[in-house]
Amino acid sequence: MTRPFVMYPHKALRTPAIPVTEITDDIRAIWDEMINAMDTMPGVGLAAPQLGIGLALAVVDASTERGKAVRMANPSILHSSIEPRTHEEGSPNLPHVSANVTRPRAVTVRFMNEDGVWDRRDFVGLWATSVQHQIDHLAGKMYIDHLSRTKREMLIKKSAKMRN
């Protein structure tokens, strides 16, 4: 059973997530639920606040064959490449709309892994875009915050209209 995605402007999407202090069976169960929700979308990443869970948890799987999800608690970017990459981003929390967002092409991320150990990993391309998108969610930001005010308001109105 997977929780439904919370819809913009739900406060969970604008509230910074609470850091996780240890990896428990409950945390692992949330990650499993998040991976199921991500695969159902289908998408390449998901942050816990998107399901209304206020914890700093994210999953990313930009593999073509799936089943390679990286489970992260408290992810933070240690290093970003200078080279940019533009990719069309969307969110199940603001359905029916998307926009091109430019982010660093590669990032090095520090996070607590599923064994409760601090880890670091380099992400490139779509993996990097997705992990940055999820870290934004954990900070209470969305991809639309990278757009001009006019474009952001247009997408919010269009999404609301399409849902009604």
Image (cartoon, grey):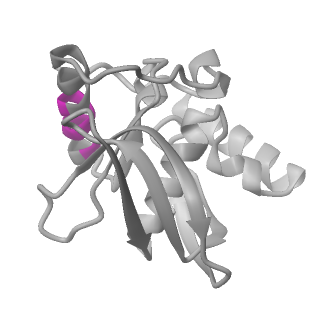
Residue 90 visible in rendering: no
Q: Is residue 115 left or right of residue 141?
A: left
Using the rendered image of the protein, determine whether residue 135 is visible from the camera's viewpoint: yes
> Main SS type for the magenta part?
helix
Quarter of the image with the C terminus in it: top right
Q: Where does the image place residue 153, in percent across and percent down from the top left?
A: 81, 44
Q: Nearer the viewer, residue 126 or 144?
A: 126
Judge left or right: residue 48 versus residue 105. Answer: left
Asked if the stretch drawn in magenta spans residue 36, the answer is yes
| Residue 25 position (above or below residue 105) | above
| Res. 160 image quadrant | top right
Viewport quadrant of the N terminus: top left
Q: Position of residue 141 (x, y in %)?
A: 67, 39
Residue that appears at 67% across and 26% down: 14
- Which residues are the magenta region? 32-38
Q: Position of residue 26 (x, y in %)?
A: 21, 14
**Residue 48 in which image quadrant:** top left
On the rendered structure, is 114 left or right of 87?
A: left
Residue that appears at 74% across and 55% down? 146
Outermost residue to the bottom: 83
- Where 142 sits versus 78, above or below? above
Foreground residue among 6 and 108? 108
Residue at (21% x, 37% y) in the render: 114
Query: Going by the image, does 7 lie left or right of 114?
Result: right
